[in-house]
Image (cartoon, rainbow, N blue to C red):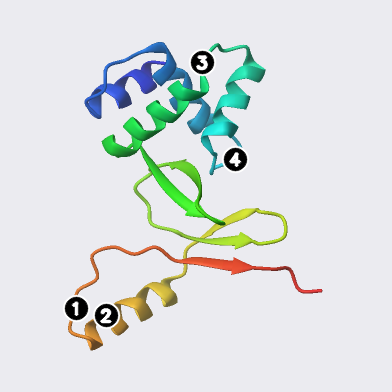
Amino acid sequence: MADGNHELRKAGLKVTLPRVKILQMLESSEKHHMSAEDVYKALMEQGDDVGLATVYRVLTQFETAGLVVRHNFDGGHSVFEVARGEHHDHMVDIDSGTIIEFHNDEIEALQKRIVAEYGFELTDHSLVLYVRKKR
């Protein structure tokens, strides 16, 4: 709880019980990418009384504060992951919805080369590959 309190204060957010519970849920979940509904259901299963509207509001506050990153995979469905400061890309299995995180130095270097060829400097990027298991 102390770590969560520190992270919230560092992000300029007041420490409230719902914020602490939601941050703890995101940090401790085996799922690295959770929708607001996933967070809400997990909190309810633990017996925590936090409303769905509160979960949405807190996740938006966390995003603004840089504590989480929002992704819109699969038809605009938002999922959130804790912002850990390390870059990675994603693969989304279109059959199961599973999200796989990966990092590839060759892809990163190629993107920088392509951007430079067009006379730009890469400031940020997001790469999502939609995949299906080979049959």
How far separated are the C-alphas under marks 4 and 1? 36 Å
Q: Which residue is mark 2?
A: 115
* The image quarter in which residue 5 lies: top left
- Residue at 52% from the left image edge and 26% from the top image edge: 25
Residue 15 placement, left or right of 96: left
Q: Which mark is residue 120?
A: 1
Q: Which mark is residue 89?
A: none
Quarter occupied by the N terminus: top left
How far separated are the C-alphas under marks 4 and 2? 33 Å
Front position among marks 3 and 1 = 3
Q: Is residue 131 above or below residue 58?
A: below
Residue 109 picture location, percent across and down: 35, 77
Q: Which residue is mark 3?
A: 50
Front position among marks 3 and 2 = 3
- Under circle 4, the secondary element is loop
How far separated are the C-alphas under marks 3 and 2? 45 Å
Residue 125 placement, left or right of 134: left
Q: Which residue is mark 4?
A: 31
First in sequence: mark 3 vs mark 2 = 3
User: Which amino acid does the dot numbered 3 rest on?
Assistant: Val
How far separated are the C-alphas under marks 4 and 3? 20 Å
How far separated are the C-alphas under marks 3 and 1? 45 Å
Residue 44 picture location, percent across and down: 62, 18
First in sequence: mark 4 vs mark 3 = 4
Structural crowding at the residue carrying mark 3, measured as other residues with C-alpha within 10 Å and reported as few (<14), some (14–19) or many (≥20): some
Marks 2 and 1: in contact by CB < 8 Å?
Answer: yes
Marks 1 and 4: in contact by CB < 8 Å?
Answer: no
First in sequence: mark 1 vs mark 2 = 2
Structural crowding at the residue carrying mark 4, measured as other residues with C-alpha within 10 Å and reported as few (<14), some (14–19) or many (≥20): few
Outermost residue toward the bottom in this view: 117
